[in-house]
Image (cartoon, coloured by chain):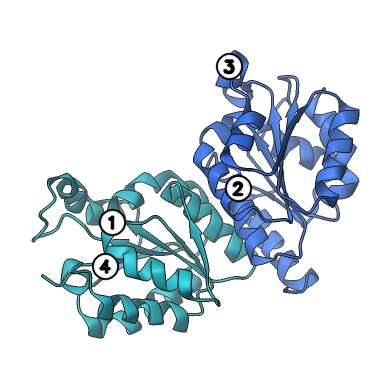
Amino acid sequence: MPVSVTSSTLIYRGLQEAGVRIVSALPETWLVHLIRMAEDDPEMTLVRLAKEEEGVGISAGAHLAGVKSAMLMQNHGFLAAINGIVSCGQLYRIPLLMLISQRGSFGERDPWQTEGGGVTEHVLEALRIPFDRLEAPEHVGKRIAKAQTLAHSASRPVALLLCRDLMWED
Amino acid sequence: MRRLDAIRAIYPELERSVVVTIMGAVAAELQSIGHRPNFFYLQHAMGLASSVGLGIALSRPGLPVVVLDGDGSLLMNLGGLTTLARYRPRNLVHVVFDNESLLSVGGFPTATSTGSDLAAIAKGAGVPRAMTVATIEEFRDAFLAALSATELTTLVAKVEAVGPAGYVTDLSLLENRYQFARYLKEHLPKE
């Protein structure tokens, strides 16, 4: 499978260095290595979800209890989680750290992914969610740390888009 | 059974737990009995109260966590029951007040009014302890048993579709949120 193990490892290290202790996730191809790393890590609690919106509640509960967490999801999962992000994450000023695989961009071969790729950034902008793109290995550690810093200083959800050039080795 | 009476019957135990409620009548009624800093009212995001409770329970395994859910809210996040069951935190009691109605938006009947059985759904999802009660005495006994049990419980309480006159209270959402987080930080040691 051409999902990058190197990049996945960098992302996982970034989460560890950011002090993340709970990761919620729904499997998707680009996230398989990250989910396995969370599962194999005795220091990490991996919560496998039925639907991404649950992850907003779990991260909110973890934050209120003083534990740092992150959400791993596909952009279609982000689209499915929007009410929770708005009416739990934003309404209650929860510093959600959302890592979203940006499927459906240039290079996408799966026809079913292509609509979501076109709307994800517009939806993030409409929701006023600060976001950045992770496109190259040198972005990863710094941008995860910076995203988490802003999430906590602003007490708001933030997003990092995991992009094709980082995640996929054609 | 009236939900207000049911909440009153377990209120002394709630003082010693961390409590997450759904919006609407449950939040307003618990506040009318007496707000405490260890109560968090999720005043929107229907369905996510049980997920917030799971996040707290996993973060603080030594703390008793009580979620006060409702039929309308739970029906919006039935998949969450499978996640609760999967991780089955021993310190979580999941109460569902089932009035078979979306009371706060005009009393429209939910699917539990036509036979959907939330305790059976919870059991089917894999929640180790799930039951339905219909009287105050049964509810109090089942709640106390759930608190002392070392297994996740979903306790469905059939209640009348009556509630308070209004739902907005004097407690602002963010005041509640920051007070609750501070309570968890200051009053309860990390596990």
* Chain letter behind tag 4: A
In the rendered view, tell whether residue B8 sits above or below residue A114: above
Mark 2 residue type: Ala
* Chain letter behind tag 2: B
Answer few, some or many: residues within 10 Å of disc 4's Cα (few below 14, many 20 plus, some between 14 and 19): many
Chain letter tied to blue: B
Question: On residue A162, which mark appears?
Answer: 4
Chain letter tied to cyan: A
Question: On residue B155, which mark appears?
Answer: none
Residue underneath mark 2: B85
Mark 1 residue type: Glu
| Front-most of residues A77 and B146 | B146
Q: Are marks 4 and 1 in contact (CB under 8 Å)?
A: no
The CA span between labels 2 and 3 is: 27 Å
Give the residue at the far top of this rendering. B114
* Chain letter behind tag 1: A
Looking at the image, is mark 4 or mark 2 nearer the viewer?
2
Looking at the image, is mark 4 or mark 1 nearer the viewer?
4
At a point 57% along the width and 42% down the height, the residue shown is B81
Question: On residue B109, which mark appears?
Answer: 3
On the image, the x and y values in percent for residue A84 come to: 47, 47
Residue underneath mark 1: A125
The CA span between labels 4 and 2 is: 30 Å
Mark 4 residue type: Leu
| Front-most of residues A78 and B31 | A78
Answer few, some or many: residues within 10 Å of disc 2's Cα (few below 14, many 20 plus, some between 14 and 19): many
Position of B152 with respect to B17 (left or right) is: left
Answer few, some or many: residues within 10 Å of disc 1's Cα (few below 14, many 20 plus, some between 14 and 19): few
On the image, the x and y values in percent for residue B134 come to: 80, 23
Q: Are marks 3 and 4 in contact (CB under 8 Å)?
A: no
The CA span between labels 3 and 4 is: 43 Å
Position of B27 with respect to A31 (left or right) is: right
